[in-house]
Amino acid sequence: MSLAFFLSTIIGTLSHELGHYTVAKSLGYYSKVSYGYTIWDDTTNRPFIDSIYSKYYKEIESNQDFPRKKEFDLIQKKYNKDGFYITLGGPIQTMLTGSFGFILLLTQKRKIIERDRINPYQWLSIFLCLFWLRQSVNFIVWVITYLINNKVLTRSDEIRIAISLSLPKESLTIFTALVGIAVLIFVIFKIIPTKKRFTFILAGLFGGTFGYFFWLFWIGPKLMP
């Protein structure tokens, strides 16, 4: 079971990045998935943007007029709009997968309770459902970082989306984390048979934690830099 959590952590991370990648490609950008992030760029307009920015940096920063300002502003406006959708793609993919798994699990709940055991199809539903845990883990990492550095990270998808929507920075992080915790509680106390709960929790803590550090801090940067 620990192996299942280990693999799910890696698969969940990569599928999340594929959400960003898919949106970026659909909008016509060059995009590449790395071990824990996705890069995207407009290779067509990038030379123009870089050239204008290097020549008129002070004017841009102070919002003054400069040659081809209107064209520059239009491209930047498009970047900002597309960047929002690309950022949204990752969390949407993760939460949709988790919600799909949750729906599948609800259809199997009665059978699991009646038989007091879980078949492979039902385990698959459980692990798909637990894609929601990414939201809770992100919140925990966010809190730990805040306690250590005394500042709020603004690089996470949920923080950036909230800022784009003019919402309180922490709102989406906290809300989706609570949904993830609610899903986990439901799975543990309504789905997992009592005799397997302790094993399930230990396997999740060990496999998930090991998978997180193994992929993001060790093997991932080597395989997919």
Image: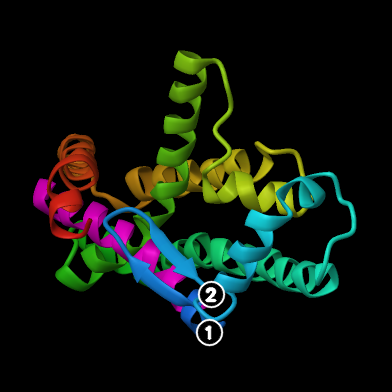
Comparing 208 with 65, the one in front is 65
Prevalent SS, magenta region: helix
**Residue type, mark 1 in image:** Gly
Asked if disc 2 and disc 1 are in contact, CB closer than 8 Å, the reply is yes
Seen as rendered, the residue at the extreme right is 65
Q: Which mark is residue 42?
A: 2
Task: Please say if 200 is above or below 65.
Answer: above
**Residue type, mark 2 in image:** Asp
Residue 9 lies in magenta, yes or no?
yes
Judging by the rendered image, the residue that carries numbered circle 1 is: 28
Label whose residue precedes the other's in the sequence (2 or 1): 1
In this rendering, the label closer to the viewer, 2 or 1: 2
SS at mark 2? loop
Comparing 75 with 17, the one in front is 75
Quarter of the image with the C terminus is: bottom left
Q: Which mark is residue 19?
A: none
Q: CA distance from mark 2 to mark 1?
A: 8 Å
Residue 211 visible in rendering: yes
| Residue 91 percent coordinates (x, y) | 51, 59
| Residue 145 percent coordinates (x, y) | 45, 24
Q: Magenta segment, which residues? A: 1-23
How many circles with numbers are drawn on the protein?
2
| Residue 149 percent coordinates (x, y) | 49, 16
The quarter of the displayed image where residue 212 is located: top left
